[in-house]
Image: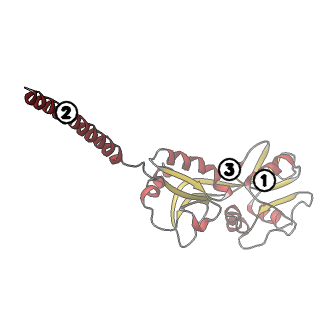
Amino acid sequence: MLGKKTNRHVVARSALRGTACYYMLLFLLSSFLVVSCSNSAPPPATPQVVLVYSTPAAEPWLSELYDCAAGQNNVVVSRVDDSAIADIGLQIGEPPAASFAYQIDTEEILIVTQRQSPVQNLTIDDARALFMGLGDPSVQVWVYSSDADVQKVFDQFVMEGRSVSSSALVAVSPQQMSDTLVNQPNTVGILPRHWKAGDVREVYSVAKVPVLALTNTEPQDAIKELIPCLQK
């Protein structure tokens, strides 16, 4: 009888051990499945960073570029100061020779004067003489640096190879030009229409020129999607 009881106790303990091992195995398998599932989830996609350069005159179109980027997945626009490293460059006027150029809008270049200036509506000859320093000496002429896109358009259509007066003051941006023409009497300068503000008078329309998006190579990936968006 003692031998039978002992056997029953051994069998019971073995059954308990077997049940414990069974549940432990289930626990380990479920843990493995949970870990496997969590590890199999794909990592978030790395955003594509698009480097953008804009001349001061083309800055009004930056907001459209940001809006276009916001409509795409995983695209981030980062502005840079060096056009050579930019994926997209914005400017007005004729494009550089070695680039892919896409027109996204049109801009009008104006000669603008302070409201109280004696300068009235100009002919092209009047405009050329004024900026050569041959006009009313009481009027202060403002221009841009010779490499600015706005100045290149002005030189092409008005100066036609002639030099502006050495007494002309140089604005670093259309914003500075606009502020000057609004606040300083007897001033005249050059403005893209998008930058015309305040109580000023336009006295001559220089030209209507393209606003361009430039790339150094044929557009690919996100850039290929951004260009058509800007053209809409």
Rounded to the nearest whole Å, what is the CA distance between mark 2 and mark 1? 84 Å
Q: Secondary structure at mark 2?
A: helix
Q: Quadrant of the N terminus?
A: top left
Q: Which mark is residue 19?
A: 2
Q: Secondary structure at mark 3?
A: helix
Q: Earlier in the sequence, mark 1 or mark 3?
A: 1
Q: Residue furthest front?
A: 2
Q: Between marks 1 and 3, how big is the CA–CA gap?
A: 14 Å
Picture colour scheme: secondary structure
Residue 108 percent coordinates (x, y): 65, 54
Closest to the camera, between mark 3 and mark 2, is: 2
Residue 207, compared with residue 96, is above or below; it is above
- Locate residue 85, reporting x and y percent: 58, 66
Q: Nearer the viewer, residue 77 or 205?
A: 77
Check disc 1 and report the residue beneath it: 176
The label on residue 193 is 3
Residue depicted at 31% across the width and 43% down the height:
37
Left or right of residue 195: residue 215: left
Residue at image position (79%, 45%) is 200
Q: Are marks 1 and 3 in contact (CB under 8 Å)?
A: no
Residue nearest the observer in this picture, 123 or 137: 137
Q: Nearer the viewer, mark 2 or mark 1?
A: 2
User: Disc 3 or 2, which lies upstream in sequence?
Assistant: 2
Relative placement, left or right, of 217 versus 90 is left
State how far apart marks 3 and 2 are (Cα). 85 Å
Taking the spot 10% from the left edge, 32% from the top edge, the residue there is 7
Q: Amino acid at mark 2?
A: Thr
Q: Is residue 150 above or below residue 198?
A: below
Residue 107 is situated, as x and y percent measured from the top left of the image, at 62, 54
Mark 3: amino acid: Arg
Tag 1 secondary structure: helix
The numbered mark, 2 or 1, whose residue comes first in the sequence reads 2
